[in-house]
Image: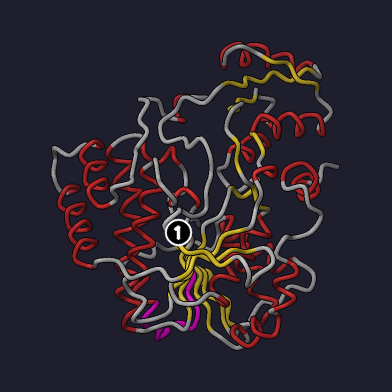
Amino acid sequence: MFDLKQFISEYVINRSQSMFREDILNFYKHLRDKIEGKTVLVIGGAGSIGSSFIKAVLPFQPSSLIVVDTNENALAELTRDLRSTKGMYVPNEYIPYPMDFASPVFEKMFRHHGGFDIVGNFSAHKHVRSEKDIYSVEALIQNNVLHAKKLLDLLAEFPPEEYFCVSTDKAANPINIMGASKRIMEDLIFSYSDKFPVKTARFANVAFSNGSLPAGFLQRIAKLQPISAPSDVKRYFVSPEESGQICMLSCILGENRAIFFPKLEEAQMMTFDAIATNLLREYGYEILKCNSDQEAIDKSADLKNGSKLYPVHYEVSDTSGEKAFEEFYTDEEAVDMDRFKALGVITDKKICDRDRLYHLLDSLENAFESDHIDKVKIVGLISEYLPNFSHIETGKSLDSKM
């Protein structure tokens, strides 16, 4: 029987246990003191990282857990998973709410509870493919930035002890709108750091997370469909378990305005075609390399007849916004590499110029109200705010590929 967790350990992250295990053990008492008996709100908690954060926090026994997510089916599965896991602590007050955190009903619920001790926000557009045109760009920026401000204004009325909002490695020297939106999000949450403690984390791809290319490999195999992957894109990976742990450690142990990131070496990077090849071999297939998506689709018909030659199309990436390499911090950022064994921390982040930030947010709001706005205009507004933003536009989207 195929064991995904074992596959990730052996072929993707190349480690048998969490890289954060020692840091969690070293700070176990501190973590328990800060979480035990506390009320916790997790927004976007049914997603890959949000649910892993929940599983990292629950062993420290918070008094209540409220989970908000727009995906009703994923919330149901999260609940079944928590209830079915041997030894999993679930507080008596556990309430999963299928709702949008920017909606009026969320605000009603939040005010009814009188705020929360610990708040984690994992609601985000996380894919580069989420910027194909002006409508997808608006949805991305609304969720990652403008709606986030609405949440922060609400939190300012009921200040939490800890607030965490997940960022991305793509926020360091961003070349796509998604990464730039997260870089702006960092400035936004830090602008509230005089009202309550705010922390974030930049980290790598979460292996086989919902909607990721590797997760798509599993879907293609289940449906006997061909696999397509870039051959030149190298990425850092963490396991689903590690993704939740780094967020928990940042949320609970981070100083105000700290940005956590994993200590990963370049040699640990993986290509997507290598993951696909190893995965297919674990399923008992040999690789049949094709020269196009269409050729791979045509030859996939043989799979239904029992063929063990699996058609794949590996090619060099040519879509908009793909970064050639990953980085967790820039040369201008101060980094502490000594406090934790497996984590680095970007420290001494200053509160941004609020006037400039809020001018950008107003400009974005006004732009989205216009009937004549386009993607180029939004890139221009962001570039005025982030001078190092170098958007890569090829005219091709991931949605045009298999």
Q: Residues within 10 Å of mark 1 (few under 14, many from 20)?
A: many
Confirm whether the magenta stretch covers residue 277.
no
Q: Is residue 329 left or right of residue 204?
A: left
In the rendered structure, the answer to whether residue 354 lies left or right of residue 54 reads left
Image position of 78 with respect to 8: above or below: below
Identify the residue at horizontal 37%, vertical 76% (top origin): 193
Q: Residue visible at 66% across and 55% down?
A: 240
Above or below, 387 against 42 in this view is above
| Residue stretch in magenta | 110-120
Q: Residue at x 48, y 65 (%)?
A: 200
Query: The C terminus lies in which quarter of the figure?
Result: top right
Q: How is the image coloured?
A: secondary structure
Label 1, secondary structure: give it.
Answer: loop
Whole-percent x and y of residue 28? 71, 80
321 with respect to 351 (left or right): right
Q: Is residue 97 visible?
A: no
Residue labelled with disc 1: 123
Say which amino acid is labelled 1.
Ser
Residue at the spot x=17%, y=59% of the render? 359
